[in-house]
Amino acid sequence: MKEPAVSADPTQTLAFDTSCHLFDGCGFPAPGLHSFLFQPLFGDADSNVYFNKTMLLALLGSIIIVGFFWAAFAKPKVVPGKLQMVAEAGYDFVRRGVVYETIGKKEGEKYVPLVVSLFFFVWMMNLWSIIPVAQFPVTAIISYPAVLAGIVYILWVSLTFKRHGFVGAFKNFTGYDKSLGAVLPLSMTIELFSNLLVRPFTHAVRLFANMFAGHTLLLLFTIASWYMLNGIGIAYSGVSFVMVIVMTAFELFIQAVQAYVFVLLTCSFIQGALAESH
């Protein structure tokens, strides 16, 4: 079962009451925002200085990724072992399939470490959703995708100014094209708003929304399976449990896709910053 998340108010109940079943006279304990809030493991939530479950998962995920690649490449061999082979396959997939294809080999090589790190970090944060005990995707908390998107945004803007200068960067962000004539001011305003505000927002929200929705569905069917485990409701509970399995498999696919999309957009931004014209 999903670990009961708790609301910021300790007087409220857990995510769902395990003693509540269909035909017991209690309503269905539907998941909500309270399912995404956790009590601090230590520290004080009121003072905003605390350490909770999602922070722990993010820290553990970072350690796992660093440990994996350290173990794989600490003593690289000409004939790679299984661990090195898996690490090389993942690294090469991102380098050739994402960076080279989007930015190009010559310009993109220097950004491979960043993009590889982003891909595996996002993927690991997503994977926590289906790992026993953890069972929560860190990226379902908007602050994590927002910070990652913010890092990409800062890199993209700084690269644009560095490559094109102030005037060139302004033209890059506004899509300046004098052939547009009278509609040029309107076009530039829309492009500026879209590039500098909408792009980073959608970059973060795309990842967050998918993981938030996926976890909510998993939680919904998991709670329903337990809630209907009573009397004739057992038949419905079985169907709901099958959906848990189906959604878990589907979520496993989505987790990888969302990591891929996040770094693909990252490379697209970098390529746009380095390109001579748009």
Image (cartoon, rainbow, N blue to C red):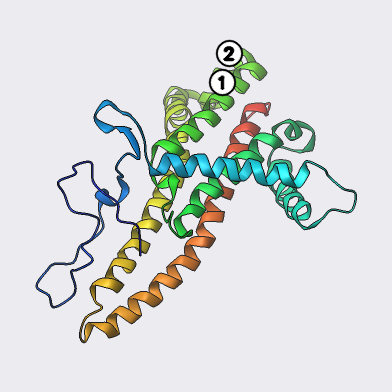
Q: Indicate the quadrant where residue 262 lies.
A: top right
Label 1 – label 2 distance at C-alpha: 6 Å
Q: Residue at x 57, y 43 (%)?
A: 121
Q: Position of residue 12 (x, y in %)?
A: 16, 49
Task: List the residue tagged with mark 1.
Answer: 171
Residue extending farthest front: 42
Tell me the element at label 1: helix
Question: Which dot marks residue 167?
Answer: 2
Mark 1, Cα crowd under 10 Å, few <14 / some 14-19 / many 20+, is: some
In this view, 177 is above or below 85:
above
| 23 is higher (above) or lower (below) than 114 | below
Regarding mark 2 in the picture, which secondary structure is present there? helix
Regarding residue 176, the answer to whether it shows in the image is no
- Disc 2 crowd rating (10 Å Cα; few below 14, some 14-19, many 20+) is few
Residue at horizontal 29 percent and vertical 66 percent from the top: 223
Q: Quadrant of the C terminus?
A: top right
Q: Is residue 219 left or right of residue 10?
A: right
Residue type indicated by callout 1: Lys
The percent position of residue 16, horizontal first and vertical second, equals: 23, 60
Left or right of 192 on screen, residue 108 = right
For image coordinates 47% across by 45% down, the residue present is 57
Pointers 1 and 2 in contact (C-beta within 8 Å)? yes
